[in-house]
Amino acid sequence: MNESFSEKVKDVVSKIPKGQTMTYGQVARLAGSPGAARVVGSLMKANFDPTIPCHRVIRSDGKIGGYNRGGSSAKRALLEKEGAL
């Protein structure tokens, strides 16, 4: 069976180790669609599965980006707690 892009993105993001981050573009490339960084962002915005650590996905310019569970300040706090910032 062919895995959907959404499933591939979730698989990539679920494997980002604690204390590390990836950019939306890196996730898109590893999921098989190098030009789909914005799609990755949309998928992460819609992700409410606690097993998918979407807070570990950041913008390519180094900025934190949005977070659907408390905004960018909550995302920053989680990344700091994990030692990623």
Image (cartoon, rainbow, N blue to C red):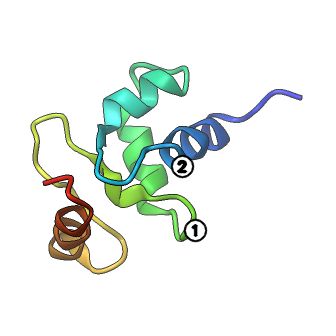
Residue at position x 28%, y 80% in the image: 70
Amino acid type indicated by mark 2: Ser
Q: Name the residue under label 2.
A: 14
Is 76 placed left or right of 16 in the picture?
A: left
Left or right side of 70 for 80: left
> In the displayed structure, would residue 35 be above or below residue 68?
above
Between 19 and 38, the one lying in front of the other is 19
First-in-chain label (1 vs 2): 2
Residue 17 at x, y = what percent?
A: 41, 47
Q: Hey, which residue is sitting farthest right in the picture? A: 1
Amino acid beneath label 1 = Asp
- Residue visible at 10% across and 49% down in the picture: 63
Q: Name the residue under label 1.
A: 49
Q: Is label 1 in a helix, a strand or a loop?
A: loop
How far apart marks 1 and 2 lie (CA) works out to 10 Å
Count how many numbered circles sit on residues in the image. Answer: 2
Which quadrant would residue 22 be assigned to in this image? top left
Tell me the quadrant of the picture where the C terminus can be found.
Answer: bottom left
Residue 43 horizontal/vertical position (percent): 49, 51
In this view, the residue farthest toward the bottom is 70
* Front: mark 1 or 2: 2
Q: Where is residue 2 in the image (x, y as percent from the top left)?
A: 81, 27
Residue 49 located left or right of residue 18: right
